[in-house]
C-alpha cells in the first residue's frame, strides 16, 4: 500500500551564522558616537585642531552640530582622543594611510648629546614616540666630542634614559654600546594595537623630519 502523500515543509533557515557575521562586521573599526564609553574625551575638530578635553556628551552634541561622527582614534590615551569626522571618510583615509605606511615606513634618526639638558631630551623623546606610534623604526644616535670621551658613562646614562622612556611603545634591537665616538641603538615599534602615547597628548605629523640632516658634531676640539 503506497504511503500517504506528505508535503515537505520548508526547513527553517539557520540565521545564526549570518547574525554572527553581521555582528562582527558591525564591531569592526574604532568606537564611535554612542559606543564610546569614556565619560570625557579630548576632541580634535574636523579641521584637525585641538578643541581640548570635554564631557563625551558635549562632544557628541558637537558632532551633531557639525553633521559628522565622533570617532575614538586613540583609545588608550587618558582621556581617549576622539576626532569629529564622517566615519566613511575616516575609514577611507585610514586605508590610504596604511597602504602608504607599508611602502613608506622607514628608519627615523634621533640625535643626542651626552650632556643634553632634560627639557631638550624630553622633546627628542616625544618626537621618537610619535615616529614609533606611526610605525616607523627609530635609530637613537648619541655622539661624543673628543673631550666627552673622558666620561663615556654620561653618554650611556643619557641614551639609557631615552630608551627607558620609550619602552612602552618599542622594543630595543641592541644594547647601548660605544663604538668610536658614537652609541647607536635601534628601536622597533610594538604591534599597532599595543601602541599608546605617554609623552604626547595626541598623534603628531605622520612622516615629519628626523635628525638625519642635523650636524650634531659641533667640532672635534670642544
Image (cartoon, rainbow, N blue to C red):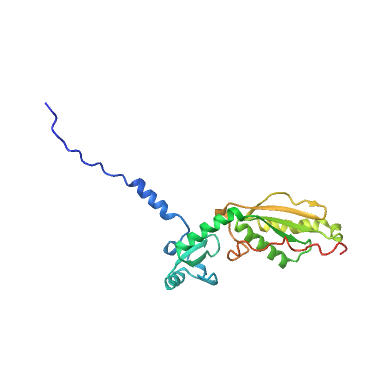
Q: Can residue 34 be seen in this view?
A: yes
Residue 148 vs residue 211, the one in the foreground: 211
Which quadrant does the C terminus fall into?
Answer: bottom right
Q: Can residue 37 be seen in this view?
A: no
Which quadrant does the N terminus fall into?
Answer: top left
Q: Picture quarter containing residue 198?
A: bottom right
Residue 163 percent location from the top left of the image: 69, 56
Residue 10 vs residue 183, the one in the foreground: 10
Residue 185 percent location from the top left of the image: 72, 53
The answer to whether 27 appears left or right of 115 in the picture is: left
Residue 122 vs residue 17, the one in the foreground: 17
Residue at horizontal 75%, vertical 61%? Answer: 112
Residue 21 percent location from the top left of the image: 39, 49
Q: Picture quarter containing residue 206?
A: bottom right
Residue at horizontal 82%, vertical 64%? Answer: 218
Residue 42 in the image: above or below residue 182 = below
Residue at horizontal 38%, vertical 52%? Answer: 22
Identify the residue at the far left of this view.
Answer: 1
The tally of labels here is 0
Residue at horizontal 58%, vertical 51%? Answer: 191
Residue 189 percent location from the top left of the image: 62, 53
Identify the residue at the far right of this view.
Answer: 221
Amino acid at each position: 500500500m503506497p504511503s500517504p502523500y506528505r508535503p515537505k515543509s520548508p526547513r527553517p533557515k539557520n540565521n545564526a551564522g549570518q547574525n554572527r557575521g553581521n555582528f562582527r562586521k558591525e564591531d569592526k573599526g574604532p568606537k564611535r558616537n554612542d559606543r564610546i564609553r569614556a565619560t570625557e574625551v579630548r576632541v580634535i575638530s574636523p579641521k584637525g585642531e585641538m578643541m581640548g578635553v570635554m564631557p563625551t556628551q558635549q562632544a557628541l552634541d558637537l558632532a551633531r552640530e557639525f553633521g559628522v561622527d565622533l570617532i575614538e582614534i586613540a583609545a588608550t590615551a587618558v582621556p581617549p582622543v576622539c576626532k569629529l569626522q564622517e566615519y566613511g571618510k575616516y575609514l577611507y583615509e585610514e586605508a590610504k594611510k596604511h597602504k602608504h605606511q607599508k611602502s613608506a615606513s622607514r628608519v627615523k634618526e634621533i640625535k643626542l648629546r651626552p650632556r643634553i639638558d632634560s627639557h631638550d631630551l624630553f622633546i627628542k623623546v616625544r618626537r621618537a614616540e610619535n615616529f614609533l606610534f606611526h610605525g616607523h623604526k627609530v635609530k637613537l644616535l648619541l655622539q661624543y666630542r673628543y673631550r666627552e670621551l673622558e666620561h663615556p658613562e654620561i653618554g650611556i646614562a643619557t641614551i639609557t634614559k631615552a630608551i627607558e622612556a620609550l619602552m612602552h611603545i618599542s622594543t630595543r634591537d641592541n644594547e647601548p654600546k660605544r663604538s668610536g665616538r658614537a652609541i647607536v641603538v635601534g628601536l622597533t615599534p610594538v604591534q599597532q594595537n599595543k601602541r599608546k602615547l605617554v609623552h604626547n597628548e595626541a598623534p603628531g605629523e605622520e612622516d615629519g623630519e628626523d635628525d638625519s640632516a642635523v650636524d650634531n658634531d659641533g667640532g672635534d676640539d670642544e
